[in-house]
Amino acid sequence: MRPRLVFVHGVGKPREAKTELEEWRAALTVGARAAGHSRKAAELLDGGAVDIHFAYYGDLFLPGAAPDNEAVAPAPAPAPAPAPAGPDEDEELRELLLDMVDEQLEAPRDDRQAQALRVTRNKLAPTGEEQGPGSLARQVLVGANSLFAVPGLRTFGGWLSAGAMKRDLHQVRRYLARKETDEAGLSLDRRIRARVATELDPEGPTVVVAHSLGTVVAFETLHAHSAHVPLFVTLGSPLGMRTAVRPRVRPQPVQTPELVGRWLNFWDRDDFVTGGTELALCIASNAASVAPVSTRVDSDGLNVHPAVKYLAQPAVAGPLIEALDAVTVA
């Protein structure tokens, strides 16, 4: 039985799963070569020694997404603008942005960035301002726009505008809100986890690599998984966000899924989506004393959040290839 490698994507526009899988595999190959594992990468990733899957759920965020037993995920299409948010949704989006700002404020690059972040925080949560109709929505938009003026963060997340950023972060809010249901009464978050669960090996070992919102989805999915996960890798994860994410993650209290044998978390200093970089401080170990181990990586370029940027890092690809090799031999 071949071991399985499952990639789990994060927020963003609809994507073509086969194309995305090849991009992630190619990036992992680059990182493996840089880590000195060229031969093993060829055997494992290109030679068929590992069964590689891409867990795609992005189409479920689209209006009128059909049940999985009635339709195949649609081809990529322009992502629609989200419906106007209500007061609760605006508050959740503001919490998410505040968590991001506060995380950056703990270790700003310099005084200029720190000052700009404080200005942004003030706009997101102004003191002494009455909360009239539409005020939360205005604060979220003004605060989001302000982030694009923060030195060093202009292209964070790959967003070209505050509207695009809100659209993607809206997906995080929708998943964690757990309010949307389809005609059969299944919640959006449950349908997303079901997509990921179908890609996991129900009997043999599965190595899971998750990115961004996908780290939350995979984390929750693995709590219900019944087979061994020798390695769980999280990239650019928001799991540690103390207000907007961590209190809403299930199950509580938050701890490592029981069948995870090792958890490696990677973060980039310039990745604005990452929150709570030292996950071991806020996520408890499982019965086997496995807790997340966080490692900082530094990618080049203006946008360091994409999964392929992380996978091309030798610090990420090295232990991943070694884990796949170990379970293949076993």
Image: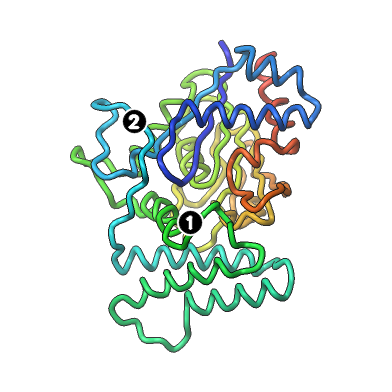
In front of the other: 8 or 150 = 150
Numbered tag placed on residue 18 in the rendering: none
Q: Residue at x 65, y 53 (%)?
A: 302
At label 1, counting other C-alpha atoms closer than 10 Å, the crowd grade (few under 14, some 14-19, many 20 or more) is many
Q: Residue at x 76, y 17 (%)?
A: 39
Task: Tell me the SS state at disc 2.
Answer: loop
Q: Residue at x 34, y 63 (%)?
A: 89
Q: Judge whether residue 45 can be spotted in this image.
A: yes
Would you place residue 179 above or below residue 183 in this image? Answer: below
Name which of mark 1 and mark 2 comes first in the sequence: 2
Are circles 1 and 2 on residues that touch, CB within 8 Å?
A: no
Q: Quadrant of the N terminus?
A: top right
Front of the two marks 1 and 2: 2
Amino acid type at circle 1 is Val
Q: Residue at x 25, y 45 (%)?
A: 181
Q: Judge whether residue 330 can be spotted in this image.
A: no
Where is residue 186? Give x, y as percent. 26, 40
Would you place residue 308 above or below residue 130 in this image? Answer: above
Would you place residue 17 above or below residue 82 in this image? Answer: above
**In this figure, which residue is indicated by the disc labeled 2?**
73
Q: Quadrant of the C terminus?
A: top right
Is 15 on the left-hand or right-hand side of 149? left
Where is residue 76? Give x, y as percent. 38, 36
Quadrant position of residue 43:
top right
At label 2, counting other C-alpha atoms closer than 10 Å, the crowd grade (few under 14, some 14-19, many 20 or more) is some
C-alpha separation, residue under disc 1 versus residue under disc 2: 27 Å
**In this figure, which residue is indicated by the disc labeled 1?**
245
Task: Tell me the SS state at disc 1.
Answer: loop
Where is residue 142? Give x, y as percent. 45, 73
